């Protein structure tokens, strides 16, 4: 009898488990039917209202791992095409938080978007009562700024609590970004300007540092108008000097176009050369520059720009390009010449820097650069050189014909063609006075012929 009762209890328990499993499957099926038929359009409508953009959801389903949203499309402001594409968004709500705290806690994994190919992990809390959304995130493999490494931070979207008289309700958006290379905070408000949503705010960053650039004390006004991001009146300290910039970037593009207008004042060249990977040799001086640049991010051959650069009180000889001139002219002491000033205009196009009469000046000589240097380090330029006769006397071969090469002011003038690369340049020397040599030789021969007549 005991064995029979025990078997009956086991059968009843097994039956209950089967019934419970069936009910669970049924409830899950009903919930998925509800999500796909009613929940999906409701969520789309809610997101349309929050984002003030057209939103489409491919599929909405529920499992033991939470709610899964697939193919979430956020369109651009003009409804021409989807701008952001989240392939899969997983939300794991907390029933305890929903019932007792009236908060929706969730963890999400965002797949790459159409224009933002980073890997994103996020956790968040939403308060239904105050409409306060707080998200903590981690970004990896962020395009165009890979030097920053993995980024951590928060995004908070909430209502402005204290309003002045006649002030309309406003949504506030705060963003923080942290990593070993950047510490940044942005505070902004979301406004409706003639039916167009705009985000207006300010950013502050104690430091933004990569292997190439070091900025400190960054402050800027910003605006996201439609899908265009603007930075106004950005100021920062750049290698003991000051940096100012206005710029914009069009996010409504797989390859975002941008424009930059920047000024550099009293930048310490030695500080720059010792801390930036862009310069391999120590040089010094004070740099002032104006830079106007436009193009598309990540596309070097689309860059176009103009700049004026001036370096004062400098030591600019620490370069294979300059040192090679001394070797080409057989003047050993030329390596000791220190250029004290450099100035001129530069142009950027076709993945090259172009110079027309960019001048370097020292007490002993002057160089005028005309030609181009490529982003790939290739050189194709001509350097016009003027040097004092004292330097010519040191050259094993120039000294022999120095009297024929000197201009009236006592300076040697010549051209040096530079090819190869900036690290391994090839020099071809052509004295400008070579025509004078031939003329003097011809005159000497003519005189000898006349004397024989």
Image (tube, helix red, strand yellow):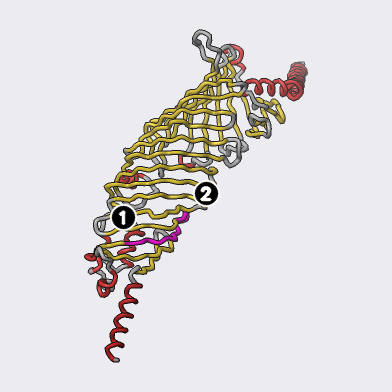
On the image, numbered disc 2 is attached to which residue? Answer: 300
Query: Residue 289 at what x, y percent from top left?
Result: 38, 43
| Residue 374 part of the magenta-drawn span | yes
Q: Residue at x 50, y 10 (%)?
A: 163
Residue 188 higher or lower than 166, as above or below: below
Left-right relation of 293 to 228: left
Give the extent of the magenta segment: 373-385
Q: Quadrant of the C terminus?
A: bottom left
Disc 2 packing (10 Å; few <14; some 14–19; many ≥20):
some
Query: Residue 41 at what x, y percent from top left?
Result: 72, 23
On the image, numbered disc 1 is attached to which residue? Answer: 318
Left-right relation of 58 to 439: right
Q: Nearer the viewer, residue 33 or 40?
A: 40
Can the viewer see residue 4 in this picture? yes
Identify the main secondary structure in magenta: strand
Residue 79 higher or lower than 312, as above or below: above
């Amino acid at each position: 009898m005991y064995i029979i009762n025990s078997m009956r209890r086991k059968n009843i328990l097994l039956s209950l488990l089967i019934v419970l499993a069936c009910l669970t499957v049924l409830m899950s099926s009903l919930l998925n039917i509800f999500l796909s038929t009613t929940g999906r359009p409701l969520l789309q409508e809610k997101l349309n209202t929050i984002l003030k953009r057209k939103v489409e959801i491919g599929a909405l389903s529920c499992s033991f791992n939470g709610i899964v949203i697939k193919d979430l499309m956020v369109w651009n402001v003009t409804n021409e095409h989807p701008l952001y594409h989240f392939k899969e968004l997983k939300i794991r709500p907390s029933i305890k938080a929903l019932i007792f705290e009236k908060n929706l806690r969730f963890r999400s994994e965002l797949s790459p978007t159409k224009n933002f190919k980073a890997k994103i992990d996020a956790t968040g809390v939403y308060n239904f009562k105050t409409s306060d959304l707080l998200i903590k995130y981690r970004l990896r493999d962020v395009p165009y700024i890979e030097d920053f490494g993995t980024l951590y931070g928060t995004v908070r979207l909430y209502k402005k609590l204290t309003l002045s008289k006649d002030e309309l309700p406003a949504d506030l958006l705060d963003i923080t970004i942290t990593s070993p290379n950047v510490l940044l905070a942005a505070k902004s408000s979301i406004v409706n300007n003639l039916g167009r949503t705009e985000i207006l705010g300010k950013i502050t960053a104690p430091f933004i540092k990569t292997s190439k650039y070091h900025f400190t004390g960054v402050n800027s006004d910003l605006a996201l108008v439609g899908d265009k991001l603007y930075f106004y009146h950005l100021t920062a300290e750049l290698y003991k000097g000051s940096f100012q910039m206005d710029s914009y970037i069009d996010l409504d593009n797989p390859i975002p176009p941008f424009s930059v207008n920047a000024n550099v004042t009293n930048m310490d060249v030695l500080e720059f050369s010792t801390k930036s990977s862009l310069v391999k040799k120590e040089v010094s001086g004070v740099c002032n520059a104006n830079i106007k640049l436009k193009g598309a991010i990540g596309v070097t051959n689309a860059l176009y720009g103009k700049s004026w650069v001036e370096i004062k009180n400098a030591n600019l000889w620490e370069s294979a390009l300059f040192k090679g001139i001394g070797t080409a002219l057989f003047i050993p002491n030329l390596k000791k010449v220190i250029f004290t000033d450099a100035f001129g205009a530069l142009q950027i196009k076709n993945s090259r820097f172009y110079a027309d009469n960019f001048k370097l000046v020292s007490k002993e000589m002057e160089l005028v650069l005309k030609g181009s240097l490529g982003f790939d380090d290739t050189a194709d330029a001509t350097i016009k050189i003027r040097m004092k006769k004292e330097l010519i006397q040191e050259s094993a071969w120039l000294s022999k014909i120095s009297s024929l090469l000197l201009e009236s002011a006592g300076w040697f003038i010549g051209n040096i063609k530079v090819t190869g690369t900036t690290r391994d340049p090839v020099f071809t020397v052509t004295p400008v006075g070579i025509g004078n040599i031939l003329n003097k030789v011809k005159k000497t021969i003519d005189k000898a012929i006349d004397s024989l007549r």
